[in-house]
Amino acid sequence: MEKCSERMGFTPLICSSSVAISSENLLNADKEGQAVVVKDRGSQMKANDVRQMFTELGLTQTFSRPKTPNDNPFIESLISTLKCSYSYPGWFEHEKEDPVKEYLQDYFRWFNTEHLHSRIGYVTPTQKHEGLAEGILSERKRALHEQRKLRKVYWTTTSATNGGP
């Protein structure tokens, strides 16, 4: 996710059991080139099924520091945003990874091309990334200025006592 435009991308997933791991963003390579998965200390991440899955995939798992949820605020924010979305189904069948991929592709398309973000001036991340935001914001400012002029004219030509324009 780019910090300046808040644009998100979708990466392929490795799915097994009920856990999905982003193969590009959540996996880091250690000094020997082997992938390492850094996870929180939640009970679902410590479960034997998850440990076995990582062992079968040849991945090393490490845990973040105890009682420090802000170790990875970006992924925590992403998960929270996904779960609060109106389109979030609540759960996925754990044997099928296609519904998860489809949902995330649709979600990121919507997030990047339709959803207006307050932090970047109520434009979409795609508009910001492609340099269209400045034109959109200047057009909004021009239209707002014009409407303020019209309102001022309306109230200066309308008597407050006669109730009409």
Image: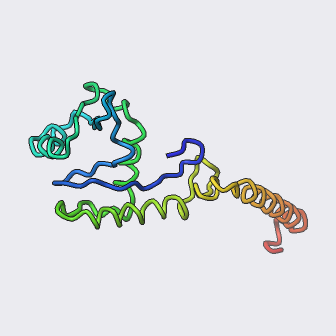
- Residue 21 position, x and y percent, is 29, 48
Which residue is pictured at 37% across the width and 54% down the height? 82
Q: For this rendering, which residue is in front, 14 or 163?
A: 14
Q: Quadrant of residue 164?
A: bottom right
Counting the numbered discs, the total is 0
**Which of 12/32 is in front?**
32
Q: Residue at x 27, y 36 (%)?
A: 39
| Residue at image point 83% right, 74% down | 165
Counting from the top left corner in percent of width and height, residue 37 is at 28, 38
Splitting the image into 4 quarters, where does residue 55 fall? top left
User: What colour scheme has been applied to the protein in the rendered image?
Assistant: rainbow
- Left of 53 or right of it: where is 27? right
**Image: 154 above or below 55:** below
- Depicted 61 relative to depicted 20: above or below: above
| Left or right of residue 15, residue 74 in this image | right
Farthest residue, direction left: 48
On the image, the x and y values in percent for residue 149 come to 86, 61
Residue 140: where, in percent of width, then height?
74, 59
Outermost residue to the bottom: 164
**Image: 121 above or below 33:** below
Residue 34 relative to residue 46: left or right: right
Left or right relative to 113: residue 81: left
